[in-house]
Image: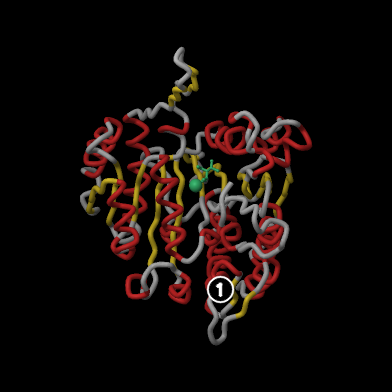
Amino acid sequence: MRGQGMHDNVPCQSISSHFYMSPSSSLKIAVLPGDGIGPEVMDASLTVLEAAGALHGLTFSLDHQLVGGAAIDTKGKALPADTLAACEAADAILFGSVGGPKWESLPPNEQPERGALLPLRKHFGLFANLRPSICYPALTVSSPVRPDLVEGGFDVLCVRELTGGLYFGQPKSRTTLPDGDIEVVDTMIYKKSEIVRIGHVAFKAAQLRSKHVTSVDKANVLTNSVLWRETMVEVAKEYPDISLAHLYVDNAAMQLIKAPRSFDVLVTENLFGDILSDEMAMITGSLGMLASASLGKPKGDGLYFGLFEPSGGTAPDIAGKGIANPIAQILSSALMLRFSFGQEAAAQSIEKAVRKAIDDGFRTGDIFTDGPGVQRVNTVEMATAIKARLA
Ligand code: IPM
Ligand code: MG
């Protein structure tokens, strides 16, 4: 809960126009809105998805299911068997967000995040998390970063390893010691093969972008990071056209604010990626703008089973008010069209419509700054403005 073919590889969002996939005819989607602002941004995004589908001759079969706190309240479990079965029967999962104060006192493993989202990622082997952090030129005024540092906007792709590291390593424990003190353990584990496969994702993405990868680690302290760095250097040898730089994570956090335009593709492990991707979203203007695709191995037809979700959380403070920014959810459905269905044209029409709506001055509260031609809108109005600009 927060505010707003060679290897087993996945391409990235910005290589779209170079990566043609065979169109899919059965567009089966498990729709899991979840909690907080999840349902309202999901509803708004589905109107845009349906409209884009109509323009491009696509029909969707949507299977709505409960997940997270909403599922705990109704079915006693964050990830009920019916929900998992619906995801298994679908070609993609469109996910809202899960969590909220109401479920925070449950045992950790039963809470919405650890009881539903993380198991879904693990169950489907969704190891590659792509988070395109795009600051539109018209939105640089919404960025908290000094205007001269973001002038003209920027486009950084965060490639986050999603099924390893501290999130999943065993053992995890909490023990009360004989002297009454409490000891907790989380385990950080990576296999070299896991680093290799995410490395390839990042380098392939960079090949179709600006050909620069920044690998982020903490190799001055962590054994995990030493292997991470060695492995990235090794993988890089297969990509002589790509330049590779390494940054310690603390320095990366600083450089992202100081010089966001100097990044192209950033690749990092699970927890560092979680933290840095929020920062990357915020410097574009708002967490409400950050879409994501979590992909597994290619299915063999150029398409990927994936889970597509905004990265921003359930924003309980504004949930139910109809004012949340639906753009991250809308852009997540564009990523789904691209990666799970091979519908590049439909994906691009959504992305272009979002950009036009921004250029035409439509702003939800999170990205609003007063000025000429700028109009404050709510969730539904933003989706309507985007729908009206689909071409
Ligand atoms: C994200 C979220 C999740 C994560 C939470 C909700 C478990 O913050 O997708 O970035 O930490 O991965
Ligand atoms: Mg996060």
Query: In what element is the residue under mark 1?
Result: loop
Q: Quadrant of the C terminus?
A: bottom right
Q: Is residue 188 left or right of residue 30?
A: left
| Front one among 25 and 123 | 123
Give how far across and how far down residue 310 sits, in percent.
Answer: 56, 53
Q: Residue furthest top?
A: 178
Count of numbered marks: 1
- Give above or below for 320 relative to 381: above
| Front one among 60 and 142 | 142
Q: Residue furthest right?
A: 74
| Front one among 345 and 368 | 368
Q: Would you say the beta carbon of the disc 1 residue lies within 8 angstroms of ligand 2?
A: no
Give how far across and how far down residue 265 sits, in percent.
Answer: 34, 54
Picture quarter containing residue 364?
bottom right
Give how far across and how far down residue 359 sits, in percent.
Answer: 52, 78
Q: Tag 1: Cα neighbours inside 10 Å, few (<14), some, or many (≥20)?
A: some
Give the residue drawn at x 62%, y 28%.
107
Give the residue drawn at x 34%, y 51%.
266
Give how far across and how far down residue 150 sits, in percent.
Answer: 36, 71
- Amino acid type indicated by mark 1: Phe
Give the residue drawn at x 67%, y 51%.
36
Question: Which residue does the numbered mark 1 point to in the structure image?
Answer: 368
Give the residue drawn at x 42%, y 40%.
270
Q: Residue furthest front?
A: 179
Picture quarter containing residue 254?
bottom left
The coloring applied to the image is secondary structure
